[in-house]
Amino acid sequence: MYPDRVVSGMRPTGSMHLGHYHGALKNWIRMQTELPCLYFVADWHALTTHYDDPAVIERSTWDMLVDWLAAGVDPSQSTLFIQSRVPEHAELHLLLSMATPLGWLERVPTYKDQIENLASKDLATYGFLGYPLLQAADVLIYRASQVPVGEDQVPHIEMMREIARRFNHLYGKEKGFEEKAQDAVKKLGSKRAKLYNELRTEYQQDGKEEALAQAKAMLDDAQSLSMGDRERLFGYLEGSRKLILVEPQARLTEAARLPGLDGRKMSKSYGNAIALREDKESVSKKIKTMPTDPARVRRSDAGDPERCPVWQFHQVYSDAPTQEWVVKGCKSAGIGCIECKQPVIDAIVKEQEPMHERAQPYLDDPSLVRAIVADGNDMARKLALETMRDVREAMGLAYT
Ligand code: TRP
Ligand code: SF4
């Protein structure tokens, strides 16, 4: 009923590295050619953990935007904006908070994990508990259908779906809904009306998902319906409520994950990262000093790629023949580690070349980035306001 739309965000808490690129950005770039996409800097989310160090957020916001552009996020296809420049996210977060059970927030796995992992910070705050709810507002405010995220974020998307469902259940009620919905069915014309009723019964009685999908497709094609009738007919298919907010779906990155230089998760704080726009010499030096299978003390010792982080880089960067060359050469001590690393260095340098090129104009003239974001903020705000109008009305806040 609402157009397909993609929304995702990243927290500006430090510089971006190749782990971010392979884990998330590549997915963003792929999706921008398929659907309308909105990508934002989640600066408020960064404050939930960095409330005592806001300077890093400001700096990282602009660096991160240059990194996105460098990586290939295309401002003529995607809308780029900054969360705090669309204050309606905060309004929706507040409104959603009224009916969100505390237990939903406390049960999100990242909540307890992060409190333990970041023990040096006091995260027993109201803002941090609300992190996934703010995230729900970020997505629901655009009625996004898809959210490209990493695996760790899936529970957040699940919770968003519950929040949307609960909202529609509580506030999608309408006086005389049944009658209005049945009138709307008649307006479909007799043939379509009959099909609609059959498909609705099939879905509601037998739980047939295809029937639901077919009915939705039919409604998408029914041009003559008013917006109100359309909402009712979509809602009536599944129950007796209007659908004001949309339940989004997670879109996971399929690609192999790129670990850090030492085989742990790539992270600037572990000192095992390669920056997105790292210079060539530094890439080469970092890979050359990367640890390998500890069993290969001498050149003549055979190794096992499974015990070597360089192999994980080959899995991301090398084609099948090269990978075969690595496995054979490593296990037979036919190649040395320096030799083995060279194709990885070459592939990373090649991947980064266009990134350096794309970044240059923005580094030369930072006002270009400001202008892209100003446009994006306006665009996002317009869409957010449309949803907020419906939300305010549904919650009985549209006083005149
Ligand atoms: N929580 C996300 C992360 O840490 C960032 C984020 C904030 C986000 N709001 C979002 C991601 C909305 C997707 C959609 O990666
Ligand atoms: Fe690792 Fe390659 Fe050396 Fe084997 S040859 S240990 S895969 S760097």
Image (tube, rainbow, N blue to C red):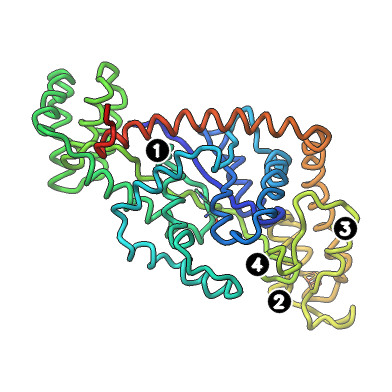
SS at circle 1: loop
Query: Is label 2 within 8 A of ligand 2 (CB to nearest ligand atom)?
Result: yes
How packed mark 3 is, by other alpha carbons closer than 10 Å (few <14, some 14-19, many 20 or more), is few
Question: For the N terminus, which image quadrant?
Answer: top left
Q: Which residue is under mark 4?
A: 265
Residue designated by label 2 = 307
Residue at disc 1, CB closer than 8 Å to ligand 1: no
The quadrant in which residue 133 appears is bottom left
The residues bearing labels 1 and 3 have C-alpha atoms spaced at a distance of: 43 Å
For badge 4, the amino acid type reads: Lys
Q: Tell me whether the residue at label 3 lies in contact with that at label 4, contact meaning CB atoms closer than 8 angstroms.
A: no
Q: Nearer the viewer, residue 275 or 384?
A: 384
How far is mark 2 from mark 1, CA to CA?
Answer: 45 Å
Nearer to us of marks 2 and 1 is: 1
Position of 332 relative to 80 (above/below)? below
Q: Secondary structure at mark 4?
A: loop
The tag earlier along the polypeptide, 4 or 2, is 4
Nearest-to-viewer mark from 3 and 2? 3
Looking at the rendered structure, the kind of residue marked 1 is Arg
- Find disc 3 in the rendering and name its residue: 282
**Mark 3 or 4 closer to N-term?**
4
Q: Amino acid at mark 2?
A: Arg
At 71% from the left and 34% from the top, the residue drawn is: 369
Q: Is residue 92 above or below residue 280?
A: above
Quadrant position of residue 325? bottom right
Residue at the location (42% across, 34% down)? 4
* Mark closest to the chain's N terminus, 1 or 3: 1
Circle 1 residue = 143
Q: Mark 3 is on which residue type?
A: Ser
The kind of secondary structure element at disc 3 is helix
Q: Is mark 4 within 8 Å of ligand 1?
A: no
Going from the N terminus, do you reach mark 3 or mark 2 first?
A: 3
